[in-house]
Image (cartoon, rainbow, N blue to C red):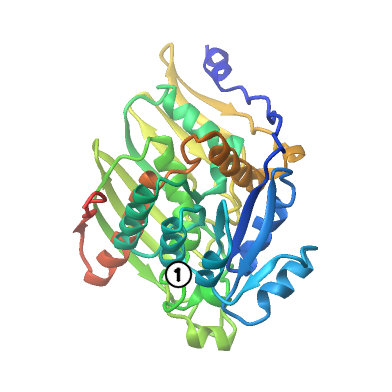
Amino acid sequence: MSDAVLGQFAPPADTEAEVDTSKKLKFGIIGTGWIAESHVLSLKQLPDVQIVAGADLIPGKAQKFFTKYGLPNVKCYPDHKAMLEAEELDAVCVCTYNRTHAECTIDALNKGINVLLEKPMCVTVDEAVEIIKAEKQSGKLLSIGFQPRMDENMKMIKKVVQSGELGQIYYIQTGGGRRRGIPNSTFIEESTAGIGALGDIGCYSLDMVLNAIDYPKPITVSGYKSNFFGTNPKYNNPADAARFDVDDFAAAFIRLEGGIIVDFRIAWAMHIDTPGDTIIMGTEGALRIPSTECWNGTVGGPMKLYKDIAGKQVEIEIPLCPEDESTGGIFYKKLRSFVDAIKNETEAPVPSSQILYNQAILDGIVKSSELGREIEIKIPDING
């Protein structure tokens, strides 16, 4: 009987469609920091893409970046506005720090350019709304950079939930993080990042479960955040500890439409190996998703489905889907799916309408923590 249940969840064959290279899309890169490296390495593998321009606020940084990756002829600009004004682009990747996500994305959309926006979408829900308004007015494609969606094990989570084997979902525990994994650079200051661990990896863990249940609207949140580790030179280098003013840990109790509760926690640093596995509980079954040592875009081991079958309590192990590196991994698939959506005029691989709710939750956690109480999550009208 359990074999019959498990049979629904066989891993799919990973195949890639033939690519039409008769027209190459012209791409620009806004921001040439760490995450831009992954974008460029993936874009270079796409035979129907040409990277023609880049922009960075730090003088000389963009030119040095593109030369390092074998693209010395890319035209470099001192800021995104100059690049958008001078170039005829099909698409841009926004790889800047969080505080400038909204500005760069809105400016590109207003120029009639498709955008792949790195996560988190932005810092506040109001910014997210303004981005979506620009998207609607432009008629261009906007996709948010959640590459874990491309992982077959992540897809399996949604497949299990959507199969109905769990029944009605009523409680979810999710999160994750690192025992020690505080980043540096622009990640740790409010003036550039806006939010810390919440935006860096918290958005991923929320997307993992919210995508599985088709992103119901968030109603209320009781949030908490702290930065005991980031500000302490015992656990962070003194120079970074002195400027650290974002969260390195956050937790929340979130109520969603449909009576679903999400118990969430995320950390860049803590005195434990994990804040817990992800658990999705339903009226007919439950799914346990093992945590990872560090958020890496997949799951930490075989998942377990808990059911009652023929009057017996059973545990069904769902084997891990093998990672098919022949197609370049999940970051490559993120860029490939974005390019395909542009060329085929299909919907965004990770639509902004979903990530609006993700951003609203992050924003709500911050506001609730600052007020010290539960708050209603209010999402402004995107049509206003």
Q: Amino acid at mark 1?
A: Thr
Tell me if residue 367 comes above or below residue 354 in the rendering: below
Q: Position of residue 157 (x, y in %)?
A: 50, 34
Please determine whether, in this image, residue 169 is positioned above or below residue 197: above
Q: Position of residue 351 (x, y in %)?
A: 43, 43
Q: For residue 129, say whether it is visible.
A: yes
Residue 290 percent location from the top left of the image: 55, 43
Circle 1 residue = 100
Q: Which residue is depicted at the point 46% across and 78% down?
A: 189
Task: Give me the residue at 48% from left, 41% from top.
Answer: 348
Q: Is residue 9 left or right of residue 247?
A: right
Q: Which residue occupies the extreme right position in the image?
A: 70
Foreground of the two, 204 or 38: 38
Query: How busy is the neighbourhood of tag 1: few (under 14 within 10 Å), some, or many (20 plus)?
Result: some
In the displayed structure image, the side of residue 67 where residue 213 appears, left or right: left
Instruction: Residue 119 in the image: state x and y as whole percent.
Output: 49, 57
In this picture, residue 179 sits left or right of residue 322: left
Instruction: Give the mark count.
Output: 1
Q: Quadrant of residue 378?
A: bottom left
Instruction: Name the one closer to the observer, 89 or 194.
Output: 89
Image quadrant assignment for residue 311: top left
Does residue 263 appear in this view? no
Q: Nearer the viewer, residue 193 or 263?
A: 193
For the point 44% across and 22% down, the residue is 163
Query: Disc 1 on helix, strand or loop?
Result: helix
